[in-house]
Image (cartoon, helix red, strand yellow):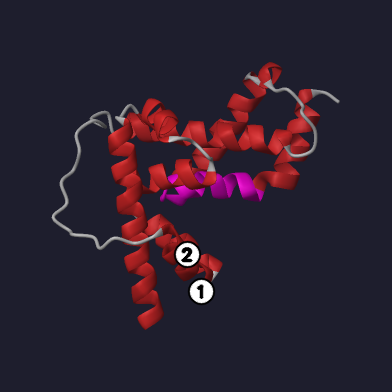
Amino acid sequence: MDQIKVLEKAYKNDGAYLLSVCRRYVRDADAAQDMFQDGFVSAYLNFDKFHDRGPGSLKAWLSRIMANTCLMYLRKKDPVRNAEEIHSVSFKATSDEALAGGMSRVKDEDLYNMILDLPEKERTVLNLFVFEGYSHREIAAAMGISEGTSAMRLYRAKARLAEMIEKYERE
């Protein structure tokens, strides 16, 4: 099967999921749609680098391309990515188990919107760490930040998410 047909099939079967990958990184729906399209162009241009490792390997490869396309977009949008914003917000510590328990009580759509409401840098690290399985070292390299900054942004994202979940449960 030629690459156009393979990518057309992936677009039909996995397009909604791949667009949701872009939406996790890019809050603006139009920009996410652009990243989705750019991701497929990149996949077409780099199809010779794809190695079929069985069911799901194309979807995983395309997911990685979508995430990397969004990272490049975010990098261009924020060229001063090493400058760390200072937040005077104090976060209370939350365990991963407590956060996971709270997340299980939230509707998927509401949780998705909470993640979209996170500040962009924190949302990006959370997505890379949780959904893409990147290590802090890989996140640091991809975003041009230190591993410590990556860990701090993940901590902030989890803390903010925990606060949002608490507020959601009170309402």
Instruction: List the single residue furthest toward the top.
Output: 48
Q: Which residue is mark 1?
A: 105
> Exactly how many numbered labels are in the figure?
2
Tell which of 118 and 166 is nearer to you: 166
- Determine crowd level at label 1: few under 14, some 14-19, many 20+ residues with C-alpha closer than 10 A: few
Task: Give the residue type at disc 1.
Answer: Arg
Image quarter for residue 148?
top left
Q: Which residue is mark 2?
A: 111
Task: Give the residue type at disc 2.
Answer: Leu
Residue at the spot x=46%, y=62% of the render? 97
Q: Position of residue 81 (x, y in %)?
A: 26, 32
Q: CA gap, disc 2 to disc 1?
A: 10 Å
Tell which of 158 and 25 is nearer to you: 158
Image quarter for residue 41?
top right
Relative placement, left or right, of 86 versus 7 is left
Instruction: List the single residue furthest toward the bottom.
Output: 171
Q: Position of residue 121 (x, y in %)?
A: 32, 43
Region in magenta:
16-29
Q: Position of residue 152 (x, y in %)?
A: 29, 44
Vertical relation: 118 (above or below) 102: above
* Residue 25 highlighted magenta (yes or no): yes
Figure quadrant of the C terminus: bottom left
**Residue 83 can be seen in this image:** yes
Relative placement, left or right, of 97 versus 88 is right
Question: What secondary structure characterizes most of the magenta part?
Answer: helix
Q: Position of residue 2 (x, y in %)?
A: 82, 23
Residue at the spot x=44%, y=29% of the render? 138
